[in-house]
Amino acid sequence: MPEILDTLSANLGQRLLAEGLRLAVAESCTGGWLAKVVTDIPGSSRWFERGFVTYSNAAKEEMLGVTAATLQGGGAVSEAAAREMACGALMRSNAQVAIAITGIAGPEGGTEEKPVGTVWFAWALAPEIVRTQRLQFAGDRSEVRHQSVRVALERLVELLESGV
């Protein structure tokens, strides 16, 4: 399974490098896994700008500018939070592209409305160009996190290829 993340990271890096773009990531439930897999690629310093691991709500507010209203309203695992995380990563870095991941990896923390495995993503190609997606993953904590990193990479490559 790690090989797919390496391949996806390398492909993303090639795409970003070809377009002269740099990436920032804002992670919650993945705890830095996304930043780790992209920096596993030799030469990633040419296209990876920085990563934010904002596990707590306070960190999301302080480091990324996620609003208290968003966190109190929809919660940290919401479309609004993912969007604000991605935009915050862009605004607080020298990157032109950002990925945000926030979710419930489990085994605890799920609710009826947001069961374990619920993950929100945001991909920002500019503050005004943000795509979001909610997915529901099956599996244990590690599997939810792995699938989240995979989807984050796959979807950004798709977005860049589509010219969005």
Image (cartoon, helix red, strand yellow):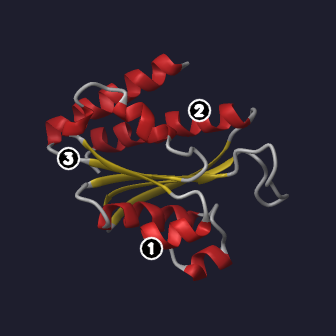
Q: Earlier in the sequence, mark 2 or mark 1?
A: 1
Residue at figure coordinates x 52%, y 78% from the top left: 67
Amino acid type, label 2: His
Mark 1 secondary-structure assignment: loop
Packing grade of label 3 (10 A; few <14, some 14-19, many >=20) is some
Which of the labelled discs sits on residue 65, or is there none? 1
Label 3 with label 2: CB-CB less than 8 Å: no
Q: Which residue is nearer to you in this view: 110 or 57?
A: 57
User: Where residue 70 sits: x, y (%)?
Assistant: 58, 76
Q: Earlier in the sequence, mark 1 or mark 3?
A: 3
Which of the labelled discs sits on residue 21, or is there none? 3
Packing grade of label 1 (10 A; few <14, some 14-19, many >=20) is some
The quadrant of the picture occupied by the N terminus is top right
Locate residue 157 relative to residue 79 in the image: left or right.
left
Q: Which residue in the protein does label 2 denote?
A: 146
User: Where residue 151 sits: x, y (%)?
Assistant: 51, 37
Which of the labelled discs sits on residue 110, or is there none? none
Residue at figure coordinates x 71%, y 37% from the top left: 141
Mark 2 secondary-structure assignment: helix
